Every structure is written in C-alpha cells, then in structure tokens.
Image (cartoon, grey):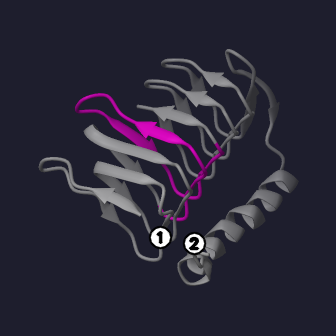
C-alpha cells in the first residue's frame, strides 16, 4: 500500500482496515476500523481532510478529495462504488454511491440513500435519507425499501470479510 505523509499531514488507518497495494492515501486522511480501500483508489488529504467511518468501502479507482481547509466526510458502512468521485461532500451512514458517479462540493447524501451508477450529485445538492437518486443531474426517483437494506447489509459484510482475508490471501505470482 502507498500511504504517504504530506508535510505535517499524516494519515491514520484503523484496525483491520485493508488498503490495496496500488491505492494511494496521502496526507490528512482518517480511515476507520474494518474498512476496505480497493486497487487504484486515490484518497488525497493534501490540503483538505478526508474522514472515513468504520466498515466503509471505497472500491477500485475511486477518487476522494477536499477543498483547502475543508472535509470530505464518508460515514460508517458506506459503499463508494468502482470509479466514483467524491469531492468535498458528506456521505452519511449506510449510503451507497454507485459506480462511476460523482458527488460534488458541499453535496450531502443522506443516511441509507442510493446514488445510481453514473449519476451526478451537484454542488450543494442534498439527497434526503432513504432515497434513490439517479441521472445527470441526480433526481430522487424512489424510496429505499427494507429488503434493499437487508441485501446491502449482506454485501457490505462481504467487504468487511474481504478486508480481513486480503492481507493473508493475496499472493503475488
């Protein structure tokens, strides 16, 4: 893994958190316990701060960044899907950010909300708790149902297990 201090900004990594060898964690980045940071992910706390809560997942090729003296905040049990960009936004607990989506400056994605694949959550946009938002720009189209929550709790648990298994299961060939 590539974890870098930048000037006086030092990452803090929680226990049993997996960071892929090709991921980069730079500067003031606080990652909670039992998280999974996938291959190619870039978490840049070079002049802003990134906070990631326990049990959260940042999948392959994601970019997280914050404006100077601001914070990009990812709650607990959040999934940031493959190739997503989260810039200076707040993602609340249990939210799901779809693959290839963008969540822009000062946006807030509510607890248990879902941002569909390829969606764009605009600057300052608020997605309420337990809503599904899709499109460019993102528009709320549905409520999150209990069966969806049950399914995603299972998926999120699988990544917690992967975070435990990867350090001892990966073998370079």
Q: Secondary structure at mark 1?
A: loop
Q: Is residue 123 placed above or below 114 in the rendered structure?
A: above
Q: Position of residue 122 (x, y in %)?
A: 56, 18
Q: CA distance from mark 1 to mark 2?
A: 6 Å
Q: Residue furthest right?
A: 147
Farthest bottom residue in view = 168
Q: Which residue is mark 1?
A: 17
Q: Position of residue 1 (x, y in %)?
A: 41, 64
Q: Is residue 60 magenta?
A: yes
65 left or right of 6? right
Range covered by the magenta-colored residues: 54-82
Q: Quadrant of residue 118?
A: top right
Specify few, some or many for label 2: CA neighbours under 10 Å numbering under 14, 14-19, or 20 or more. many
Mark 1, Cα crowd under 10 Å, few <14 / some 14-19 / many 20+, is many
Q: Is residue 16 above or below residue 77?
A: below
**Percent x, y of residue 142:** 82, 31
Q: Look at mark 2 in the image and give the residue it sits on.
A: 163
Total numbered badges shown on the rendered structure: 2
Q: Residue at x 21, y 56 (%)?
A: 10
Label pair 1/2, CB-CB below 8 angstroms: yes
In the rendering, at what x and y percent does residue 114 appear? 71, 39
Q: Is residue 148 left or right of residue 34?
A: right
Q: Is residue 50 above or below residue 47?
A: below
**Which secondary structure dominates the residues rendered in magenta?**
loop
Tag 2's secondary structure? helix
Farthest residue, direction left: 8
Q: Residue at x 59, y 79 (%)?
A: 171
Q: Nearer the viewer, residue 56 or 20?
A: 20
Which part of the image, by quadrant, shows the C terminus?
bottom right
Depth order, front residue of 55/118: 118
Q: Residue at x 40, y 52 (%)?
A: 24
Query: Of label 1 and label 2, which has the lower sequence position?
Result: 1
């Amino acid at each position: 893994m590539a974890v870098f201090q930048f000037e006086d900004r030092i990452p803090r990594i929680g226990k049993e958190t997996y960071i892929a060898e090709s991921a980069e964690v730079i500067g003031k980045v606080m990652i909670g316990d039992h998280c999974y940071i996938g291959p190619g992910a870039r978490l840049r706390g070079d002049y802003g701060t990134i906070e990631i809560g326990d049990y959260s997942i940042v999948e392959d090729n994601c970019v997280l960044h914050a404006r100077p003296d601001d914070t990009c905040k990812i709650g607990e049990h959040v999934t940031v899907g493959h190739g997503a960009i989260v810039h200076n936004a707040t993602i609340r607990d249990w939210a799901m950010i779809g693959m290839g989506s963008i969540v822009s400056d000062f946006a807030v994605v509510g607890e248990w909300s879902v941002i569909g694949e390829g969606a764009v959550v605009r600057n300052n946009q608020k997605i309420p708790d337990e809503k599904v938002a899709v499109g460019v720009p993102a528009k709320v189209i549905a409520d999150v149902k209990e069966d969806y929550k049950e399914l995603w709790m299972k998926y999120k648990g699988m990544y917690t297990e992967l975070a435990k298994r990867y350090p001892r299961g990966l073998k370079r060939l």
